[in-house]
Amino acid sequence: MKRTKLLSAFLVLFTAIGFISCDVEPIDPVLLDYEAPEVLPASFKVDFSGQTYTATTTEAVIADGLIAIGGIRGTNGETVGFSVVGTTTGTYSGANLIMSYEPSAISEYTYNNFNPANEETSGTVTISSIDTVNHTISGTFSFTGWWGDAEANLPSVAFTNGVFTNLPYTTSATPTPGEDDEYFKATIDGTAKDYSIISGLTAGTTLNLTGTDAATMSFMNIMVDTDITPGIYTMAESPFDGPTASYQVGEIGYFTTTGTITIISNENGFIKGTFSFNGADIDGINTIVVTAGSFNVGY
């Protein structure tokens, strides 16, 4: 089996969080005796493996029919997160939900809410509050995570008592464009895609570039070093060995078998290039051909 990374879908929408400010209105003297309800600070916690995971940084986006939320702990890219198909309060599960735990940015696999051995899924997310005035979101979640490498035969991990409170969210998953328009395009088995949701995320020394199609819950991801210089590179099967790419639709991921990527420029917070690759699913049975790939992504 190929040593490839089962990329977490929750990375698709994570971009820099913008906080919303507002003007302070004069207080009506009649209301001076009014005691406003306590507003809890932003927090993200979940229990697993005998510990309580408390995020030191949070990111949340509500855009293009999706909600994506993540809690990052420390500086090595350790992340618990999820994305749901929907933008309103309510409970989400099944095909409308992808959840994941990434031990670190260089971890080759992740714990996901679907079992690669039998395609069993788990997990629920309840969005209890979306404050559209202060742009915060709150709710609860839980799931069972299975290690992405089925051959490792690792036990599943239960993620319980997950709660996120007053997380600031943005309503755009696309960073502010530079001088050139931001874009991410590719042709997959002859079908051209021009992704409307684009993100660039750094985690340690790794730069993740992602284009997402919310309608089909599919995304294209490219992983390169953050300091990669202009040139032509051969794609690798593992991110440990060089630039790599993947394409995921629903719960099925296709990973690089052969391919090339050309970096045209990487400066001032934008990276531009072209790519093409052949990919296969984790069992090496189903394949795809990706051609005419191009991107200009801010990070």
Image (cartoon, rainbow, N blue to C red):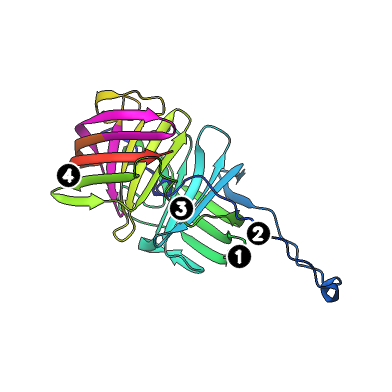
**Cα distance, mark 4 to mark 2?**
49 Å
**Cα distance, mark 1 to mark 3?**
23 Å
**Cα distance, mark 2 to mark 1?**
9 Å
Question: Is residue 263 something that shows in the picture?
Answer: yes
- In the image: residue 68, left or right of residue 6: right
Give amino acid for label 3. Answer: Phe
Q: Is residue 116 above or below residue 37?
A: above
Residue at (60, 50) in percent of width and height: 44
Mark toward the start of the polypeptide (1 vs 3): 3
Q: Nearer the viewer, mark 1 or mark 3?
A: 1
Q: Characterize the magenta stretch by its predominant secondary structure.
A: strand
Q: Which residue lies under the disc numbered 4? A: 288
Residue at (58, 54) in percent of width and height: 168
Highlighted magenta segment, given as a residue range: 244-273
| Structural crowding at the residue carrying mark 4, measured as other residues with C-alpha within 10 Å and reported as few (<14), some (14–19) or many (≥20) | some
| Structural crowding at the residue carrying mark 1, measured as other residues with C-alpha within 10 Å and reported as few (<14), some (14–19) or many (≥20) | few
Q: Which residue lies under the disc numbered 1? A: 133
Residue at (46, 65) in percent of width and height: 87
**Cα distance, mark 4 to mark 3?**
26 Å
Q: Nearer the viewer, mark 4 or mark 2?
A: 2
Dot 1 falls on a residue whose secondary structure is loop
Q: Are marks 4 and 2 in contact (CB under 8 Å)?
A: no
Dot 2 falls on a residue whose secondary structure is loop
Question: Is residue 285 something that shows in the picture?
Answer: no
Q: Are marks 2 and 1 in contact (CB under 8 Å)?
A: yes
Q: Which residue lies under the disc numbered 3? A: 82
Give amino acid for label 1. Answer: Val
Mark toward the start of the polypeptide (4 vs 1): 1
Mark toward the start of the polypeptide (4 vs 3): 3
Dot 4 falls on a residue whose secondary structure is strand
Q: Which residue lies under the disc numbered 2? A: 22
